[in-house]
Amino acid sequence: MDIAPTISELLDIPMVPPDGKVIPEVIEYATTYDCQKVVLVIVDSLGYSLYRYFTENGGIFQNVRQLAESGMVLRCQSTADHTSPAIASIFTGYLPTNHHVYATDDIYVERAKDSLNPKIKTILEWAYDAGRKSAIVIESHGADTFLDRINEVFGVPDSQDIIEYDSKITDAAVDALESKPDILAVHLRAIDRYAHRAQTWEELRYAAGTVDVNIGRIVENAEKGTLFMICGDHPIHANEKWISSASKAWIGERQDQLVALVVGAC
Ligand SMILES: [Zn+2]
């Protein structure tokens, strides 16, 4: 929930101060690199321990690591153990107990109660209202909640083939970058889907590899001086099938609710 207020500070976008706090290291870094734009990539299920596992075993996540090398990797507390409330916290800066968005449709319910409620207003909407260009690329149902509220909304229908789905998300993100948004948000889901459905670490590493390739494509197409914030929404769902074959280091930390936030400029 510190991500939205940090973007607000960095891009000088006014917002009602939320529960989250500005991350000073990120502001300092972005100022040094003179970043005027932000691309926020939410990597579903990228817990901090899993991130470390991917980067330390088998050289997965080369593109993300490259960003991290000039920037930083922060451990963040996630606000929920599943996607909708956690992503709502990333976008609004509020705890789930304050934004009340536990499923996509809750956004409409909360808006009906109070259309001006700042606790359900995303950093993308604050940006748009301040005259900045904001764009989002997410699953169609979630994308609909942003219609007529920000500059560009790209929805991709959910699919059984999550690799193809993420690839379409990435194509749309590359298209979105052509209009040079001040802030672009993207949600990649392959790791989360594989965590649920795959059986082996090899498959999970494959999913992570595709996520890294997609992030690499987005980085390549971003303007120089763009700050990338790449973060998990919640850790991988604890599941016996992963624990039984995991490394000791990973088992030791898997119980926490820490997610990775990789910050780096391109
Ligand atoms: Zn998720």
Image (cartoon, rainbow, N blue to C red):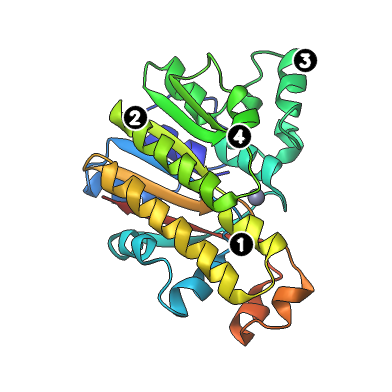
Upstream in the sequence, badge 2 or badge 1? Answer: 2
Q: Which mark is residue 182?
A: 2
The residue drawn where x is 65% and y is 55% is 193
Assign a secondary structure to mark 3: helix
Q: Is residue 27 visible?
A: no
What's the residue type where badge 1 is placed? Leu
Cβ atoms under marks 3 and 1 closer than 8 Å: no
Q: Nearer the viewer, residue 68 or 130?
A: 68
Residue 134 image offset from top left, x and y in percent: 41, 26
User: Where 236 sits versus 183, above or below?
Assistant: below
Q: Is residue 104 visible?
A: yes
What's the residue type where badge 4 is placed? Pro
What's the residue type where badge 2 is placed? Asp
Please name which of the two marks, 2 or 1, marks the residue nearer to the observer.
2
Cβ atoms under marks 2 and 3 closer than 8 Å: no
Assign a secondary structure to mark 1: strand
Upstream in the sequence, badge 1 or badge 4? Answer: 4
Please name which of the two marks, 3 or 4, marks the residue nearer to the observer.
4
Upstream in the sequence, badge 3 or badge 1? Answer: 3
Distance from the alpha carbon under mark 2 to that under mark 1: 28 Å
Q: Nearer the viewer, residue 217 or 84?
A: 217
The residue drawn where x is 43% and y is 28% is 135
Query: Circle 1 is placed at which residue position?
Result: 258
The residue drawn where x is 26% and y is 41% is 35
Upstream in the sequence, badge 2 or badge 3? Answer: 3
Q: Which mark is residue 113?
A: 3
Q: Nearer the viewer, residue 220 or 199?
A: 199
Query: Circle 4 is placed at which residue position?
Result: 157
